[in-house]
Each structure stands twice: as structure tokens, then as C-alpha cells.
Amino acid sequence: MSSRVFPDRRAAGHRLGGRVATVLARRPDLAPTRPVVIGLARGGVPVAREVADAIGGDLETLVVRKIGAPGHEEFAMGAVTADHLVVNDDVPNRLGVSREQFDAIVARERRTLQERESLYRGGRARIDVAGRPVILVDDGLATGSTMAVAVDSVSGAGASKVVVAVPTAPSDAIGPLLDRGVDEVVVLTTPKPFEAVGRYYQDFGQVDDEDVIDCLSGDTPPIS
């Protein structure tokens, strides 16, 4: 049987939106007021668009940048948003990355993410999540560091409730999110053994900036 469960991100989001709607109907305390659905840019935004449409939430995005190791950028030392940082245990020390090197990488990634957020919003102010329920959405979880820093960011901004919703994740990624204060984790599939997120999509092509802007503006055709 093929491991590719979802045709693409929007199809995954359509299914995920139905599951989130069911969870919120069962637990109205999670979203007693209109929720803010935040897609982690870039891959999480098409998924979040469908979730927001399914539950009547306000769509927003959050840019999270992985902190790649020097010379091995694909190896994440942690993740960063404009206002929060998560480091993967003592990875920088084990890789021999000095504090000065690490801080320089973080500063560079923050400049990049601030430019991206400005581009995506087109001059619009960020939606204030203080006192509002938030649903954080990505196209999947791997290590969980990206979602962890997103959780810290919205919690620090005063979100009243935090729900994480993803199409696929390893089962052992759920507990650490709950330990971090997440109120509910909604996952469609938890394959064992878990492989790379893209393995569970038939089409896992790169989401570009225009795709993100179109999703945020609502300029996307409905799923047939």
C-alpha cells in the first residue's frame, strides 16, 4: 500500500479542516470565540487556508526559520521566529558551533523572516492573537522544533488557547507539544515508522511566495 496518503497540501488541509471542526464541536472550550488559524510559512499556509475555511477562522501566517548548522544547513540546530527561539538540546555545542556563530545565524534568519512576513502581509498589520484561540497549522511535523517555537510565539503573544493541527506527524511528537502547554493536538495520520513529511504526499512541490500571498488574500479556487 502506498504511503502517499494526501494528493497535495490543500487536499490534506481539506481533510484536516473536517477533523478540526469535529474536535471543536466536541470541545467548544477550545474555541469559544472566532479562532485565528495560523499557517507556518510556507508549506503550512495552503493547509491552513482550508482549515480556516472549514471552521470559519481568520487566516494568518507565521514565518519560522530553521537554524541550519554551518556547512550542513539541512541539519537543524533549532528554529526561530521574530520573537522566540528554540534550540535542539545541545546540538550547537556538539557541532562545535560557537555562541558568536550561532547568534550571527539567528540574526540572519530573523532578517529573512521579517522580510518575508512584510511581503506576505503587504502592509497589513499582524492579527492580534491576545485573548483569542489559535490553531497552528503546518503540512506535517518531523522533529517538532519548528512547531515548538511557533507555540512559544503565540503563547507569548497571549493566545487564550493553542491547538496544533497537522496532517501527519510521528506519534512521539505529540507529547512534547502537550508538555509545552498546547491544549489539543489534531493529527490525521501517525505512521510508524515515520519518514520525511513529503513521503506522505503525492505532490509535495515547493510553495512559493505568490502561493502564500494568494492563500492569505483568499485568491485560491475551491477544491472540486
Image (cartoon, rainbow, N blue to C red):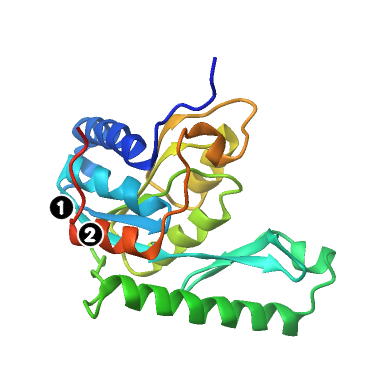
Q: 216 above or below 201?
A: below
Q: Position of residue 69 (x, y in %)?
A: 73, 67
Number of residues whose C-alpha sits closer than 10 Å to that of mark 1, classed few (under 14), some (14–19) or many (20 or more):
few
The residue located at (75%, 71%) in the rendering is: 70
Number of residues whose C-alpha sits closer than 10 Å to that of mark 2, classed few (under 14), some (14–19) or many (20 or more):
many
Question: Which quarter of the figure has residue 212?
Answer: bottom left
N-term mark: 2 or 1 = 1
For the residue pair 147 and 28, the one nearer the viewer reads as 147
Q: Position of residue 172 (x, y in %)?
A: 59, 36
The quarter of the picture where the C terminus appears is top left
Question: Which quarter of the figure has residue 71?
Answer: bottom right
Q: 170 above or below 164?
A: above
Mark 2 lies on a secondary structure that is: loop
The residue located at (30%, 31%) in the rendering is: 15
The quarter of the picture where the N terminus appears is top right
The residue located at (58%, 82%) in the rendering is: 107
For the residue pair 204 and 147, the one nearer the viewer reads as 204
Q: Is residue 136 left or right of residue 30?
A: right
The tag on residue 34 is 1
The residue located at (79%, 79%) in the rendering is: 98
Residue with the most extreme top position: 1
Q: Are marks 2 and 1 in contact (CB under 8 Å)?
A: yes
Of the residues shown, which amino acid type is indicated by label 1? Arg
Of the residues shown, which amino acid type is indicated by label 2? Arg
Residue for badge 2: 132
Q: Position of residue 188 (x, y in %)?
A: 41, 30
Q: Is residue 49 left or right of residue 181?
A: left
Mark 1 lies on a secondary structure that is: loop
The tag on residue 15 is none
- What whole-number distance in Å separates the C-alpha atoms at marks 2 and 1? 7 Å
